[in-house]
Image (cartoon, grey):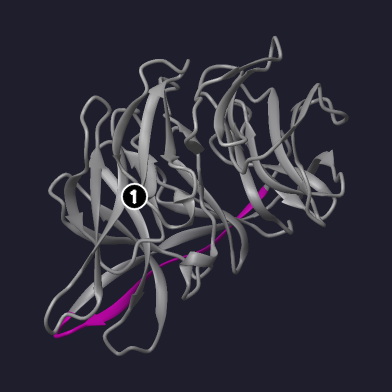
């Protein structure tokens, strides 16, 4: 693994004046990592729209589309190969993901969910029928696959539902009505999402809340109210949910993105912030590690990730990165897209 020079930038606390009291929002300690990126796969001239690395770190899957439009391409390669793909096919879809603990890849194509066994290169259609199935999301333990089902034409504004099935396609069942920002808990036992309701009377704004659903039960259950509009939900540990939302101090001087932590009691507390996330946190795409301990993103200061266990942000200072990103937790690498192709940098604690 490449050597990296790590420099502690600063540990401080940002004092924010709220009404008549003082509330401390921790400005998370930042360590700058001077680690140049290593080219893994050269650029193909196509835009990478989705990328994921298998849990053993041996295989990488890419979903690419031509810059001028056209048919997308699914490619599966060995990470150490550095060359052509051993599996390719044209697909009509936008997402893919490896099932944890296996070399099986779930992806969408033509309005259905498919499963690829990368070792045998055999594929199986997990969903069939006239409905449109998309956005497959495996549970962290690899037991279930979450996906969205809608009637044809419903993606443009009609009703849709979130469904769940076993990782082999068995026992498909409706979980809950469609909701935004759905995410698994680290055990694969529950799903969380963002709900929205409108205030009445003098409360002309909208209010957001967290809700949970459990495979085997149908429907969402209210969990907790939110401060601001959640732009990303993250469940790094059992009993502790985090979301990032814009927050403005009482003097209205500045809006910043703040990480709020919601415990089992449902009460939210300001847990962390980063100067790399600007006013509009909807501009950023977040990539949690498969087991929940880290989340990576490309912010105003470049590529960085928040380590929940260490309560620290690691920022890579010598790379020019763009999304999508992908984690190789087995090898200790974080993959990112760059001008010349797909690169990786070593992360701490791998």
Q: Secondary structure at mark 1?
A: loop
Of residues 32 and 41, the one nearer the viewer is 41
Farthest top residue? 120
Q: Main secondary structure of the magenta part?
A: strand
Q: Quadrant of the C terminus?
A: top right
Q: Position of residue 228 (x, y in %)?
A: 30, 69
Label 1 crowd (10 A; few <14 / some 14-19 / many >=20): some
Q: Position of residue 301 (x, y in %)?
A: 61, 67
Which image quarter: residue 59? top right
Which image quarter: residue 212? top left
Give the side of residue 191 with respect to residue 168, left or right: left
Q: Is residue 36 above or below residue 100?
A: below
Of residues 228 and 332, the one nearer the viewer is 228
Residue at figure coordinates x 47%, y 67% from the top left = 281
Q: Which residues are magenta?
A: 5-21
Q: Position of residue 74 (x, y in %)?
A: 73, 34
Residue at figure coordinates x 36%, y 39% from the top left = 162
> Which residue lies under the disc numbered 1?
179
Of residues 243 and 294, the one nearer the viewer is 243
Give the side of residue 248 with respect to residue 322, left or right: left
Of residues 6 and 245, the one nearer the viewer is 245
Q: Quadrant of the N terminus?
A: top right
Q: Is residue 295 above or below residue 258?
A: above
Residue at figure coordinates x 36%, y 49% from the top left = 159
Q: Is-magenta flag for residue 20?
A: yes
Q: Is-magenta flag for residue 194?
A: no
């Amino acid at each position: 693994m490449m050597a990296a020079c790590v420099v502690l930038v600063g540990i401080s606390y940002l004092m924010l004046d709220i009404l008549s009291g003082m509330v401390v929002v921790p400005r998370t300690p930042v360590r700058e990592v001077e680690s140049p990126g290593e080219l893994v796969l050269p650029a193909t001239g196509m835009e990478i729209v989705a990328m994921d690395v298998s849990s053993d770190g041996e295989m990488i899957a890419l979903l690419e589309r031509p810059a001028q439009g056209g048919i997308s391409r699914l490619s599966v390669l060995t990470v150490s190969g550095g060359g052509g793909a051993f599996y390719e096919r044209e697909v009509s879809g936008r997402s893919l993901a490896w099932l944890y603990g296996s070399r099986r890849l779930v992806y969408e194509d033509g309005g259905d969910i498919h499963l690829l066994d990368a070792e045998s290169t055999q594929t199986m259609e997990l969903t069939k029928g006239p409905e449109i199935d998309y956005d497959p999301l495996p549970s962290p333990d690899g037991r279930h696959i979450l996906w969205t089902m809608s009637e044809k034409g419903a993606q443009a504004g009609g009703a849709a539902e979130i469904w769940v099935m076993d990782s082999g396609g068995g026992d498909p069942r409706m979980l809950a009505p469609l909701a935004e920002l759905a995410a698994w808990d680290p055990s694969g036992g529950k799903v969380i999402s963002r709900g929205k309701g409108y205030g009445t009377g003098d409360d002309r704004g909208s209010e957001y809340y967290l809700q949970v659903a459990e495979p085997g039960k149908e429907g969402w259950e209210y969990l907790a109210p939110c401060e601001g509009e959640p732009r990303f939900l993250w469940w790094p540990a059992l009993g502790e949910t985090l979301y990032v939302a814009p927050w403005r101090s009482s003097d209205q001087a500045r809006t910043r993105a703040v990480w709020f932590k919601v415990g089992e009691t449902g009460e939210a507390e300001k847990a962390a912030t980063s100067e790399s996330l600007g006013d509009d946190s909807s501009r950023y795409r977040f990539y949690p590690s498969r087991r929940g301990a880290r989340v990576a993103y490309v912010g105003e200061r470049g590529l960085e990730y928040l380590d929940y266990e260490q309560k620290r942000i690691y920022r890579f200072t010598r790379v020019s990165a763009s999304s999508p990103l992908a984690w190789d937790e087995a090898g200790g690498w974080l993959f990112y897209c760059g001008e010349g192709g797909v690169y990786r940098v070593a992360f701490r604690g791998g």
